[in-house]
Amino acid sequence: MAGTGKATAALRLGVNIDHVATLRNARGGAHPDPVRAALLAQEAGADGITAHLREDRRHIRDDDIARLMAALRVPLNFEMAATPEMQAIALKHRPHAVCLVPERREERTTEGGLEVAADAERLRDFIAPLAEAGARVSLFVAPEEPQIEAAAEIGAAVVELHTGSYCDLHAAGRDAARDAELRRLYTAAVLAQQLGLEVHAGHGLGFDTVGPIAAMPEVVELNIGHFLMGEAVLVGLGPAIAEMRRQMQAARA
């Protein structure tokens, strides 16, 4: 896909450590510790750490957020639903970034993008105190023009484009539909950049899908978790992150 003619920004890697906490919570003890995993990811070259504090605390817990804030040298991207409880927690800890995501208790993972256009006034009021507290507010959205335009209008700093549909189509071998979804993602990234939004992307990305997303010059950060944690079980977290960075950089070049 052709670029916009603008200089290609450096591409950052955010590592989501939620599923280290999933494994810990399956046994109910203290191990493996997601904070230790975050520190290992930091040492392996992660540019930031992402953690999603869900309403039901199914993986990351409140004390994990406090410990991450105390331990990390790289920025923490705090994923959360747009609820008063989560807003209060974010305002207490003041992470570098807050990413608002849709959340349903029955879902296994985040299934779609945030509905910004239909909820613009509430979200405008919701994100204002977070931005005033110094957090970069990101909205996790589908690659749809109305959602991106609404994100810019209500004062978000960042949009994170949901790459899950692209990854699912790739896994299903539906090449034509996958390529159409890639074009949607690219069009959305260009629009977001034109509207002054920083562009991130994530969800479902792995070694076989990261390249086309990393090659988009408008995208400046990828947030990847489940795949890296799965690879870490087999090869170690450091090698998994190193290989992901290598593939990202190769695609960017």
Image (cartoon, rainbow, N blue to C red):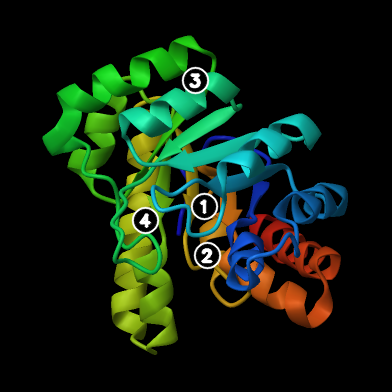
- Which residue is pictured at 36% across the width and 79% down the height? 169
Q: CA distance from mark 3 to mark 2?
A: 36 Å
- Which residue is pictured at 52% across the width and 65% down the height? 212
Three-letter amino acid code at the position of disc 1? Met
State left or right for residue 19 relative to residue 163.
right
Q: Secondary structure at mark 3?
A: helix
| Disc 1 packing (10 Å; few <14; some 14–19; many ≥20) | many
The quadrant of the image that shows the C terminus is: bottom right
Residue that badge 4 annotates: 185
Of discs 4 and 3, which sits in the foreground?
3
Residue that badge 3 annotates: 91
Residue 183, x across and y down, in percent:
34, 61
Q: CA distance from mark 1 to mark 2?
A: 7 Å
Residue that badge 1 annotates: 216
Contact (Cβ within 8 Å) of mark 1 with mark 2: yes
- Which residue is pictured at 85% across the width and 54% down the height? 44
Three-letter amino acid code at the position of disc 2? Pro
Q: Earlier along the polypeptide chain: callout 4 or callout 2?
A: 4
